[in-house]
Amino acid sequence: MTDTTRQLYNLTRSVCYTGKIPTKYFTLSPVNANREGDKRILIIPGNPGICDYYITFAIRLFQATGCRLSIDCVDHAGHSGLETDVYTLSQQIQHKLDYVKQYIPDSANLILIGHSIGAHIAIELTKSLPYARVIKSFLLFPTIERMAVSPNGVRLVPKFASKFYRASMVWGCFLVSCLPRSFLEGLVPTNADRYCVEATSRLINKDVVSNCLYMANTEFREVVNLDMDGIRANLDRLHFHYGPNDEWAPQTYYQDLVDKFPQGQIVLDSENAPHAFVIKFSEHIANIVSKEILKLW
């Protein structure tokens, strides 16, 4: 990233109160631009819902769309490590609605980008907000149906249902968090950017892990049947992007969706990007999404 590019945006990382919940977020905005612009991007993370994982993706997206759009990304409730309460998937949806109502100007037309379970949340926001407010929702590696019987779900549901397993994860995380930062950095794949390193260090927190596990259990219970009515009513505003080897949203789910909605914008990634694309494939996915965003002008 060149110094010239850095001069084109401001990156703000801070804490806000969404409802009454302390929440970390970041905003990427053009230098000398009015944040009350007519289009605004909101990135909704997967689980873990730590916004720092998406900073590089947001920067690449900002560049690829002409350095003119403000981009927000907000942690999931309880994933900021600032409190001990835990939150369900339904509460996470309300949390994002509250963020939009409190912090995004009414004049802004929203472009939603939901990753993984964030795609489910993005669909709910698309349905709940005034129709004219959301002009497009990009659903990346979407976990929007049959989570518990997906390949990863089959492996993890029994573990996450075990109180012993959850307690072991939480307290194991606490012990790891006491180790030097250099050790934590070793947990991130080689060549991952520094923001992913920072995000992983935030993840190694017993309260955050407790929230991730609790939220995942509610996902398994609630994300079962495809929301046919919701998708049908908003099909022209939805863009689905699947991965060929995604074990949360397998290729069979992609094909099923294509069969149900042959007129939909439903694509399969061409470069085998993984479900956790933010680790090494941020630029690739940003380029794909940016091309679609530029069509909105």
Image: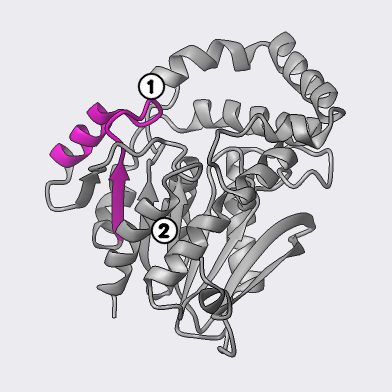
Q: Classify residue 83 by image quadrant.
A: top right
Q: Residue at x 74, y 47 (%)?
A: 80
The secondary structure type at the circle numbered 1 is: loop
Q: Quadrant of the C terminus?
A: bottom left
At which x and y percent is residue 154? 44, 14
The numbered dot on residue 67 is none
**SS assignment at label 2:** helix
Residue for point 51% across, 75% down = 5
- Mark 1 is surrounded, within 10 Å at the Cα level, by few (under 14), some (14 to 19) or many (20 or more) other residues, namely some
The residue under label 1 is: 150
Tell me the residue at 74%/60% (across/down). 19
The residue stretch that appears in magenta: 238-259
Q: Residues within 10 Å of mark 2 (few under 14, many from 20)?
A: some
Relative placement, left or right, of 72 versus 252 is: right
Question: Where does label 2 land, which residue?
Answer: 127
Q: Which residue is nearer to you in this view: 264 or 141?
A: 141
